[in-house]
Amino acid sequence: MLRLLAIRDFVIVERMDLEFGPGFTVLTGETGAGKSILVDALAIVLGERGDPGVVRHGAQRAEIAAEFDTSDAPGLESWLAQNELAGDAGACLLRRVIDSGGRSRALVNGHPCTLAQLRQAGEFLVDIHGQHMHQSLLRPACQRSLLDGYGGLGAQAARVAQHYRHWRDLAGQLQSVEQDAARLERERDEVSLRVRDLQALQVGDGEWTELQADHQRLAHAASLLESAQMGVELLAEGETSCLALLAAVSGRIGHAVEHDSDLREVLDLLESTQAEVQEAVYALRRYGERVDLDPSRLAEVERRLEAIHDAARKYRVPPAELPDLLDRSRAQLERLTAGLDPESVRRQEAEASDAYQGAARLLSGARHHWAPLLAQKVTAAMQTLAMAGGRFEAVLTELEEGNAQGLEAVEFQVASHAGLPARPLAKVASGGELSRISLAIQTATSEVANVPTLIFDEVDVGIGGGVAEIVGRLLKDLGRKHQVMCVTHLPQVAAAGDTQWRVVKTRTDAGATSAVEVLDGAERVEEIARMLGGVKITATTRSHAQEMLSLAGRELPATGGEKRDGKRVKGKGAAG
């Protein structure tokens, strides 16, 4: 249920904060006062597209925030958790910011999100029925969607569409396999030859680097051994070796230290140097013992390097990447081998077709169950909307071939009077009739809606008199199950509301100012009298307004809100 709506710098609204309650709330006001602006603002915070034109003149950005009680929105909490958008338990805060440059930001519970995610969250919370919905009602897609929505078949329809796409993808793949068999065969032969070559070569990971290091060592083995031996000779084994000279110097300095301790530091350095030189001699001797002078090993390494280099040049990759090329080639060969098996693809295509047909038949059965129930519900509503004897049907026509929407086409047909055959909605309904049928369908489908809040934006256009009173009663009954709001210009509908708000716009030197006022009993009488009588309100129109409210079964207590200049003000807006 919608609890709060905060609007900043939106169209002509500078600042407005609205609190909502349960039941049926009506919004009234003179033409141009901005009644539908509230609906437009709510639509934008629910994910509708918004352009820079919604930013109030002179402002940098428009901002709209809506707070909802989610205790009556099944599925939303788990969806929020799955999308990492969860907030406080039992509540959901949606926020939308649009700047004057056209950039938009969307947030759910303070978390940045995409516009699609904002729209998905809104689908759990609110349904908005606009005054032009009857135009889209003529489209087959809308009719099918309404039937599926009435029966709660949305998830089933989505699965059917998914099965259909998978089936058609496999059917296309089968056709491609059958047409391209020769080309695929040639490609598989090429890849198979490459795999055999690389498998025979058996290049290991890191082998190329290791071979290069081995080659460097083997190719220069004689020179390396000679260098090591010369080092040992000069450092330790020659008559004037380094170690012998260091020992002689250390001995002389050792005797001198007895006479002058300042030479102790020099002696320590000499002894340390002797130890390090001796370690170097040991290392050179060990290295000389390990140096391999095996010409056959050198030749073997050179042959291996040449073979790897030839393969790398043949397949146009660096030598070190040959192991990766083998892995990729094996995977490619596996795909091509599977692709060259038409029977395998044909079997998968048949299984996908069976899965689609099974899901589509289940959906078809459900549609055949719900279609007459929807027809019965809408027909009953038509009898109360000045279409006595009229009949509504949701006709299901089997398709020769199924499609992503199922095995049948859905078409709404109507007989506007008794004795007439039902015909497609677009061919028989006048503008007024279409508006009433649209309202009947909306109220029928809304009764089974999962969303807690339903908003009707002047859906009663083209309706008047006693029919308008019935419309008000329908919406009032709907308000017992849902939170219902309706923007209306009909006094009969307004009188049926549990709560009535009036949207007013005044002009001052600073510009136009809009305000939303919660009306108490006496104020409701005045507003409905204005809707009945126009500019001049007489005692007769007031009496008529009081009678309408009484007939609607409405007690008229003063309701909450802050008194300001004799009015209870919910929110104010200004345009400079």
Image: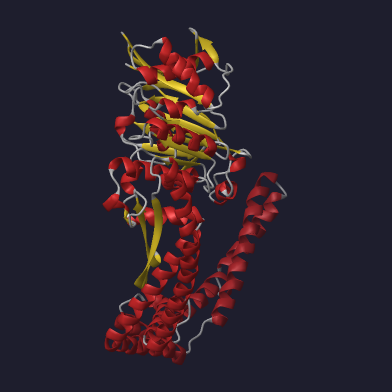
Task: Give the farthest residue toward the front.
Answer: 419
Q: Residue at x 40, y 45 (%)?
A: 388
Quarter of the figure with residue 494: top left
Asked whether 129 or 309 is in front, the reply is 129
Q: Is residue 56 left or right of residue 477?
A: left
Is 429 above or below relative to 53? below
The image position of residue 235, as x and y in percent, is 55, 69
Please state which of residues 139 and 427 is positioned toward the viewer in this rendering.
Answer: 427
Compared to residue 546, the image places residue 82 above or below, namely below
Seen in the image, is 165 located left or right of residue 564?
A: left
Where the C terminus falls, by quadrant?
top left
Residue lying at the far bottom of the rendered structure: 296
Q: Nearer the viewer, residue 416 or 573?
A: 416
On screen, residue 111 above or below 322: above
The residue shown at (47%, 64%) is: 368
Across and down, in percent, residue 162 comes to 44, 66
| Above or below 206: residue 200 | below
Q: Position of residue 567 (x, y in %)?
A: 49, 12
Q: Is any atom of residue 154 visible in this view? A: no
- Left/right placement of residue 177 relative to residue 562 reads left
Q: Is residue 284 visible?
A: yes
Camera-nearest residue between 10 and 431? 431
